[in-house]
Image (cartoon, rainbow, N blue to C red):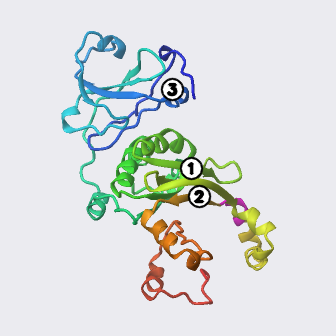
Amino acid sequence: MARCNSPTAMLIDLPPLIMTGFPIVPKLPSEFAKCNGCTFSWSRVQLEACGTLELSERTKNVDYNEVSKSFVYTPTLDDIGCHLKFCAVSGQAEGCIETISKVEVTSGPGSCPFEKRHKYTSNLTENGVFRIMSYNILAEMYLNRDYLTEFQYCPRYAVELAYRTPLLLKEILGYNNDILCLQEVGRELFRDDLLPSLEAFDFEGHYREKGGGTAEGTAIFFRKSKFRYLGQHDILIIDHLETDAGCVDILQKTYSNGNFKEAFKRNFQTVQVSLPQLFLMDLQEMLYCFGSLVVRASAPEARGRGFNPRPSHTKRLTKMALAAASLDA
């Protein structure tokens, strides 16, 4: 059990951009976040402009209107123009740690395209059914590197992580998935935003970075009410190809082109295999009844991966076939 230090020595960070309709996640100190029995509250306050007066001075002797007791909060239209105060109280320490946003709540971008898709996933899945999603987060390191060549059509502010993070959270949560397979997940995004926010919605998450010191990787989240975590096996593809005898043919084809070989070795890829155990009481009862008939039956398997189709792939999708001579075969 974690032991908390005095709360007066801790700091909380709130996002530099707060928009109505999009969730915000406070960044708690790790030693505080590990304490059990934490309670949270959000309040709003209307502050008058006071020139260069520090925010701490402007917030003295003002009244706060409590708006939520959850860890993750989604601002409403009533919050526009106000600052938000977040307070966390640990069950193991007296008092609380709190902070006030440095920015006012602003209007969000309005209706997003993914909200139309949310209409098809408005409810959680029923018992015995689960929904799985694969999603490419697009790591910030690639946005910063390739912005001028790949993303000039997008306003600069819209590729900043401060803007993208609340949109990502709203989209991901709105699909009501039970398993999330995420790729190109930045290290800090997972640690500071995705993990704490999704944990607040009954998810457990695990992360694996690519090789070569790259600060992004894959993440798997699963809903704890449906799955139990048993273990994790991470595979660095380049190491697997070079050490597994069963991959000799693949390795030979991959390395037959010198330029491709060098590009492949630089592009570290991982396969993350998580082993959550599905709670299906009706299935367990069925297996018990049929006993010896299913002793040797193999368990069902679900695989998730990224999907990046090109216009030329349309026929393959509609015909469900791939020519043997295809480069994608």
Amino acid at circle 2 = Ser
> Where does the C terminus fall, quadrant-wise?
bottom right
Q: Say above or below: 230 vs 16.
A: below
Query: Does the residue at mark 3 contact the one at mark 1 (Cβ under 8 Å)?
Result: no
Rendered location of residue 320, percent (x, y): 47, 86
* Residue at x-position 37% and y-position 52%: 173
Q: Quadrant of residue 301?
A: bottom right
Q: CA gap, disc 3 to disc 1?
A: 20 Å
- Image mark for residue 68: none
Rendered location of residue 6, percent (x, y): 51, 15
Rendered location of residue 50, percent (x, y): 27, 14
> Where does the N terminus fall, quadrant-wise?
top right
Residue topped by disc 2 = 274
Q: CA gap, disc 1 to disc 2?
A: 8 Å
Q: In this image, 180 relative to 56: left or right?
A: right
- Image mark for residue 32: 3
Q: Say above or below: 185 vs 107.
A: below
Q: Quadrant of residue 174?
A: bottom left
Specify which label sits upstream in the sequence, 2 or 3. 3
* SS under mark 2: strand
Q: Give the range drawn in magenta.
A: 264-269
Residue topped by disc 1 = 206
Amino acid at circle 1 = His
Specify which label sits upstream in the sequence, 1 or 2. 1
Q: Say above or below: 25 vs 3.
A: below
Q: Badge 2: few (under 14), some or many (20 or more) residues near its Cα, within 10 Å? A: some
